[in-house]
Image (spheres, helix red, strand yellow):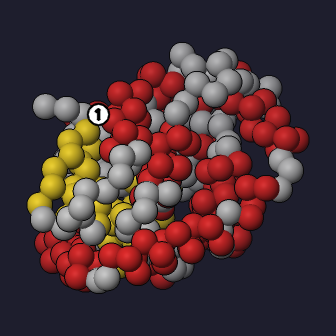
Amino acid sequence: MQVVEVTSDGAVRTVTLNRPEKRNALNAEMLGLLEAAFSVAPGPGERVTVIRSAGPVFCSGLDLRERAGTLDRPGASSIEEMLDAIEHYPLPVVGVVQGDAIAGGNELALHCDLVVASTAARFGMSLAQIGLAPTWFLAKKLLEVCGPVAAREVLLLGDPLPAERMHALGIISRVAPPDQLEVEASKVINRLAANAPLSLRAMKALLVREMQFRQGIAHDDVDALVEAARRSTDAQEGIAARMERREPLFKGR
């Protein structure tokens, strides 16, 4: 079985993260398969694509063991290309989040057009807790979806937020008890599948284009700060501590 599976059922295409034994941590293979899944044109009968995951965790983020060996290589991660493909996919994308969506998993969920989450799920960006910082592209999406106040809480504190709080902040679309998640998700998916496809394409293109202005802001100096954090000894320590399940000892270098 592939670590990312793609199936179709009428108007609904489903992309499933299938690495539950690793908490669906995104390795290079998964990133490539996800990007490929959203780089193809929709089939003639497709109206909506659903992203979901096998197992109890939606996605724990980038695979830290794989990432630990790429900290000194600029541009080593292809997560931005994958998320950009999802953001620009011409039809609506619905994230069905049954469990924790952390760091890259949080970004994966928030790059969906609509998110339906279980009340058992938590969302978070724990980068500050392991010595890293989001790129301009990733922070831009957080600001678009969360707004400045919630984005600060998500990024600066780094603690995961319950799905119900994410919903109260207007960051995700709907929440439901675990045993009602599929029922609630089906309501959203079926409504989208029944809507006019040309309208959906036009509306998604409008929304994506109107949120692109931040990409044109000069940010070379910010990129340099992010890169310095990524290449720091603190980042090496933070990742090692997270894998060893201990508190990191940051030294500011």
Q: Quadrant of residue 238?
A: top right
- Residue 24 at x, y = what percent? 31, 40
- Residue 60 at x, y = what percent? 39, 44
Residue drawn at x 66%, y 35% as measured from the top left: 131
Q: Does the image show residue 78? A: yes
Is residue 88 depicted above or below 172 in this figure?
A: above
Depth check: 78 or 235 in front? 78
Is residue 59 depicted above or below 140 in this figure?
A: above
Q: Left or right? Give the position of 37 relative to 54.
A: right
Residue drawn at x 50%, y 57% as measured from the top left: 88
Query: Secondary structure under badge 1?
Result: helix
Is residue 38 depicted above or below 65 in this figure?
A: below
Is residue 78 depicted above or below 115 in this figure?
A: above
Residue drawn at x 11%, y 61% as measured from the top left: 9
- Residue 198 at x, y = what percent? 38, 77
Q: Where does label 1 land, which residue?
A: 22
Depth check: 172 or 76 in front? 76
